[in-house]
Image (cartoon, grey):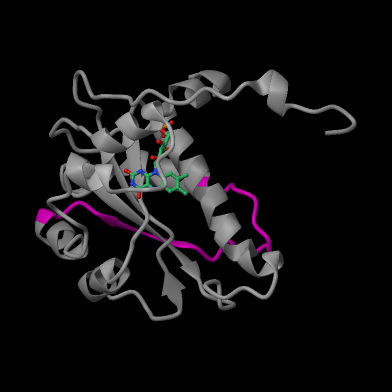
Amino acid sequence: MDFYEAISRRSSVRDFTDEAVPREVIERIIGAAYKAPTNDHFRDWHFIVVTDKAIMREVLEGVPKALTVQDVDRMTFISDPVQKRAYQYAVPKQYSMLMDAAAVIIPLMKKKVDVLHPADLSHLNCFASVWCSIENLWLAATAEGYGCNLRIPCGDEEAKARAATGFPEEYMIPCFIGIGRPAEGAVRTKQLVPDIEKQLHWQKF
Ligand SMILES: Cc1cc2nc3c(=O)[nH]c(=O)nc-3n(C[C@H](O)[C@H](O)[C@H](O)COP(=O)(O)O)c2cc1C
């Protein structure tokens, strides 16, 4: 698939078929993740790939299972109807979009600094770098014909996933990634379209 086509086709997929993702595909897309730019040259990220449903259930134990559109109505930061419709679709699927995926991929970044209390922006470099790897992975999965979604762990979600998979304390989960073959008719939520002409500036703002 052409590079720009993969970029255009990438979107969050939250409904999957039962099809497994072959091991070599997972290995290729994780290989793509390791081609991402990195702040300190180490690329010392790890990726845990969970396909076993019993382990997946344990990993996702902390993820809310019964969120509804009424919960979205209570989210005061939503300011736009298109944005609201996207949340109304996505929020109730936070558990099923991962649990029904062929695999949950857990990227891990090393906590080299206190990223939750950064002294300045450079303290977030390791966080920014792992996100570059996540985007590479997502685009590679799209180019392979698969779909992904992601969820940021909140509250005790990371601790539950740590207990289920045994990764060391020095690592942190930036997000959970669900991957699989998109179901027929899988919804791609409508997006706000930025006005690039207004947002692209040449020479001066
Ligand atoms: C930093 C970040 C955090 C996100 N967190 C979540 C999340 O917790 N749950 C979810 O369903 N989607 C999450 N998303 C996916 C966005 O909802 C999605 O990318 C956005 O609506 C645009 O839709 P698209 O991916 O289909 O283009 C996140 C995306 C990013 C980049």
Vertical order, 133 against 184 (above or below): below
Q: Position of residue 55 (x, y in %)?
A: 15, 62
Q: Residue at x 56, y 78 (%)?
A: 114
> Which residue is at 67% across, 75% downward?
119
Which quadrant of the figure shows ligand 1? top left
Q: Is residue 43 magenta?
A: yes
Q: Quadrant of residue 195?
A: top right
- Residue 146 in which image quadrant: top left
Task: Tell which residue pokes out farthest to the bottom in this image.
Answer: 169
Q: Quadrant of the C terminus?
A: top right
Residue 191: give x, y in percent of width and height. 43, 25
Residue 54 is situated, as x and y percent measured from the top left of the image, at: 9, 59
Q: Residue furthest right?
A: 203
Residue 117 coordinates in the image, percent (x, y): 57, 76
Residue 101 visible in the shown view? no
Q: Is residue 105 left or right of residue 35?
A: left
The image quadrant of residue 106 is bottom left
Per the rendered image, the range of residues in magenta is 33-53
